[in-house]
Amino acid sequence: MMKLQEQKIGTFLRDLASNNPTPGGGTVAALTATFSASLIEMVCNLTMNKKAYETVHKRINEYYIEASRIEGKLTKLADEDARAFGEVMKSYKSKDKSKIKKSLKYAIEVPTEVRKLSQVLEKIGYKVSKIGNKNARSDAKTAIYLARAASKSALENIVINKKALAKLG
């Protein structure tokens, strides 16, 4: 499978719309969170080194670094989510209950991390929207909304996999 960041958006969208189970909602949750991180970085870039915002340069730079770090993690998690779901499918075919449980646990871990990182991005986005370049405030707000959507979407994947795990006993 081609890594997400190596794909053109059109290819990814075709894959997403196909009858294949991956990429799916978990991958999209992680990708949505990366959009949030990128928007935060953009607002920080539009704020840094602007004389009108010199009192917040240090904090804005810290937010930029944190959003960039999280973006890198989320990009890997987007690919990892598709792999985790593939392992779930493979384990069900094997009918080995221990393999199924193991794969479901991993399929819970990945969106759990996406959810945590999305929640951090939502907080950073809020802070940046308050002190960042006022001309980019709508971008910071969009970052907040995308982070919130990613977090809720990741939660849906956690819930469904926990239900499947509970059925196994």
Image (cartoon, rainbow, N blue to C red):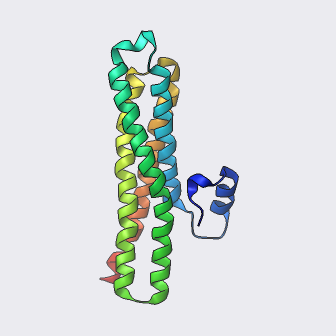
Q: Quick one: quadrant of the C terminus?
A: bottom left
Image vertical order of residue 9 relative to residue 141, above or below = below
Q: Residue furthest top?
A: 51
Residue at 51 percent across and 47 percent down: it is 32
Report the side of 55 relative to 7 (left or right). Answer: left
Label total for image: 0
Residue 71 visible: yes
Q: Nearer the viewer, residue 166 or 64?
A: 64
Q: Position of residue 12 (x, y in %)?
A: 64, 56
Q: Nearer the viewer, residue 76 or 39?
A: 76
Q: Position of residue 139 (x, y in %)?
A: 52, 30
Residue at 50 percent across and 22 percent down: it is 46
Image vertical order of residue 156 relative to residue 63, above or below = below
Q: Nearer the viewer, residue 105 or 146?
A: 105
Residue at 46 percent across and 84 percent down: it is 92
Residue at 40 percent across and 59 percent down: it is 111
Q: Position of residue 165 (x, y in %)?
A: 35, 76
Image vertical order of residue 162 relative to residue 6, above or below = below
Residue 141 visible: no
Q: Residue furthest bottom?
A: 95
Q: Quick one: quadrant of the N terminus?
A: bottom right
The quadrant holding residue 154 is: bottom left
Image vertical order of residue 68 relative to residue 165, above or below = above
Q: Position of residue 58 (x, y in %)?
A: 33, 22
